[in-house]
Structure formats: C-alpha cells, structure tokens
Image (cartoon, grey):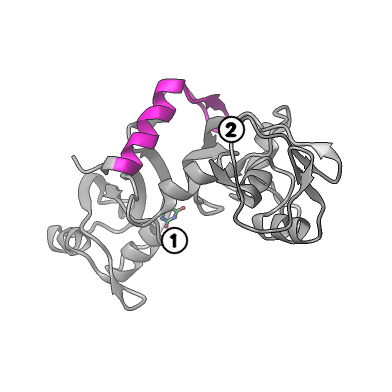
Amino acid sequence: MERLQKVIANAGITSRRKAEVMIEEGKVKVNGQVVRELGVKVGNSDKIEVNGVELTQEVKRYFLLYKPRSVMSAVSDDKKRRVVSDFFTDIPERLYPVGRLDYDTSGLLLMTNDGDFANQLMHPKFEVEKRYIARVKGIPTKEALRKLENGVMLEGRKTARAKVRLQSFDKKKEKAIVEVIIHEGRNRQVRKMFDIIGHPVQKLSREAYAFLDLKGLNAGERRELTHHEVKKLKALTQFGDKK
Ligand code: URA
C-alpha cells in the first residue's frame, strides 16, 4: 500500500506536490469515490482516476548509458546543449538520470523512471562504489595520493576514505592516469579533490558504478539492465556495498 499522491506522481503524470493539490481540489477518485484527504493509502487493486482518466502504472525501466563528453546529465537544457534524454527518444517512458556526471565527464550513468530506486541509490547512507579514471596534470606523489585516500577538506567537510592508485604517468608530457574509487557523490568531487593537491583533472571518465561497468558499449550507447542487475542494485541499498 502506498500513499495516493505518491502513486499519482510515480505514474509520471505530475509531481508529488501537484498531486497533493489535485487531491485537495477533488480531482482524484479512488474506486469511484472522490478522495480529498492526503495520506490515503492505495494498493494495486484500487482503481484511481485523475480528472476522470484512469491511472495506468508506468512500467519501470532501468538503463545504463555510456554518456559521452559534452552532454548534460539532464532531461532538457535551455542552452540547447545535448542532454542524456536525447539517447532515449525511442523509449516512451520518461527517464531521469540517477545522479549526474559533469558536462565534460564521460562514462556510466543510470537512467530510470523509478524515482524510489533513484533516490535510494543517491541517498548518502547508501552511496554505492563508483570507479573513475582521471587524467591529471603533472605526476602526483605517493603522499599527495595518500592525502586523497585519507580524505581532504572540501567546502568545510572532509571527503570520506577513497581508494586511489597511480596507473601510469608520462614524464615528458607531464601527465598521469589515476584510478579513484569513491562512495560519495558530491558536486564535481573528483575534480575538486585533484585541484586540492595541485593536479587538475584534464579528462575524467566513470568506469564503474557498483558492480556495473561499460563493457561492450561505446560512448553514446546504452543497454537495459537485466532483472537480476536491478534486483542486485536494490539489494545494495538495503545491505550496503562495502566490500
Ligand atoms: N566527480 C567529478 O568531478 N565529476 C563527475 O562528473 C563525477 C565525479
């Protein structure tokens, strides 16, 4: 059983707040009766009508997108830049990104119309493991990388422990490739962490999200998650992702 306003919002008609207003205005019927109180709970067998139209539950869809660089993690953009929704124009459901990758960051991004699932995955309590590959300016020392592992002060709050590994470096070109594994999802976190140790990120890609990776996909391609993968992701938010 779920709250009526939540069921209406989840059906993709409107936001939860607007659904509440519609209920209060008497525009919603449950099993033929107008319901004006908020908080009424309904189940799968209840017939819900909004403005006289019966509600059909949207099928839940879950996708993995290999987001290319120069694409916004958004459903629309007033500056007319490319957005992640442009890769799903053939899918009738309205999909939203789970969290975001910067415009200039490429890599793995989940897309879904399951709001509860997205919120669970993004909740700081359950933040799942994310693996990034960064190309940075200069060659960070072991000490600098250890600093990142132990946590650095970012906007007044220390970053959580991370795994950081120097993968390769080029002395002549003065750049290095570093693998970073974090659980948090703060705004531009990886870029800011490297700024702090004086090695700005030149290129960033998210290679893995929990147990999912980009295998078999090129930038701009997507695949639907299997039922098993969705189940596993849901389980992570219940039991944590610490290995
Ligand atoms: N950290 C960043 O700096 N950018 C991203 O897009 C993701 C993590």
Q: Pointer 2: what residue?
A: 220
**From mark 2 to mark 1, how far is it between C-alphas?**
21 Å
Say whether mark 1 is within 8 Å of ligand 1: yes
Residue nearest the viewer, comparing 84 with 54? 54
State the residue at coordinates (40%, 54%). 123
Indicate whether 35 appears above or below 157: above
Please state if 156 lies on the left or on the right of 53 as rendered. left
Q: Pointer 1: what residue?
A: 188
**Residue type pointed to by label 2:** Gly
Residue 102 visible from this viewpoint: yes
Q: Quadrant of residue 138?
A: bottom left
Percent from the top left, x then y, of residue 110? Answer: 50, 38
Percent from the top left, x then y, of residue 127? Answer: 34, 50
Report the span colored magenta.
214-238
Indicate whether 78 appears above or below 226: below
Point out the quarter of the image occupied by ligand 1.
bottom left
Question: How packed is label 1: few (under 14 Cα within 10 Å), some, or many (20 or more)?
Answer: few
**Residue type pointed to by label 1:** Arg
